Amino acid sequence: MSLIGGGAAPYHWGRYRGLAQNLNRPPLDEMMRNNVFFDTCVYHQPGIDLLGQARLRRQHPVRFRDAGRGEGRRSDHRQPYDDTRRYVDALPLSAADKQKIFEGNARKVYPRLGPKLDRIAAARIAARK
């Protein structure tokens, strides 16, 4: 399984295709169809929109990733650039597709993560009671 981070995903596809061709590998779409997860560390709505379109057109899995805070703030000082959740929330995707981006695909990439997340969620629910 491969992870292609941030803006590299849509903009370097030609480079990846050329490498595969030079190495006598199968066509890139065929080789990577269900083996590549794009992430959301893009930091602007147009880039996230492009990932959303890839998700809708080709069913490429997108995995949520937020680099934490520190990439700077917009000039109006309202939102940090690296608050990628708001960009994904703005996509015209179903709730089920957004759940895959925010959690489901991470569970596929990191299968041991699921039980740990489940324990954390159960502890939080128990603490509220």
Image (cartoon, rainbow, N blue to C red):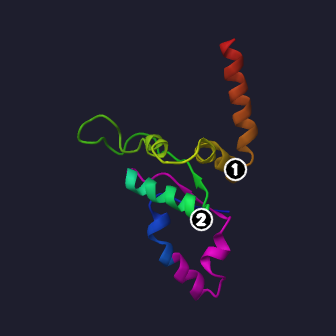
Residue pictured at 57% horizontal, 88% vertical: 22
Q: Which mark is residue 110?
A: 1
Q: Quadrant of the N terminus?
A: bottom right
> In this picture, is 113 found above or below 41?
above
In the rendered image, which quarter is residue 58 located in? Answer: bottom right
- Nearer to us in this view, 126 or 96: 96
In the image, taking residue 69 as reference, residue 32 lies left or right, namely right
Q: Which residues are magenta?
A: 16-44
Badge 1 marks a residue whose secondary structure is: loop
Front residue of 101 and 56? 56
Magenta stretch containing residue 9, yes or no? no
Residue at (44, 61) in percent of width and height: 7
Does the CB distance between marks 2 and 1 fall below 8 Å? no
Kind of residue sitting beneath label 1: Tyr
Total residue callouts: 2
Q: Quadrant of residue 127?
A: top right
Which comes sooner in the sequence, label 2 or label 1?
2
The furthest residue to the left = 75
Which quadrant of the structure image shows residue 32?
bottom right
Who's the residue at 27% across and 35% down the image?
Answer: 77
- Return the residue at label 2: 58
Identify which residue is drawn at 44% across, 45% down. 87
Is 33 colored magenta in this rendering?
yes
Amino acid type of the residue tagged 2 in the rendering: Arg
Q: Considering only vertical position in the picture, is 80 above or below 42?
A: above
The answer to whether residue 4 is above or below residue 22 is above
The crowd level at tag 2 (other Cα within 10 Å; few <14, some 14-19, many 20+) is: few
Q: Nearer the viewer, mark 2 or mark 1?
A: 2
Q: Position of residue 121 (x, y in %)?
A: 69, 28
Gap between marks 2 and 1 measured at Cα: 22 Å
Residue 23: x %, y % from top left:
61, 86
Above or below, 91 against 51 in this view is: above
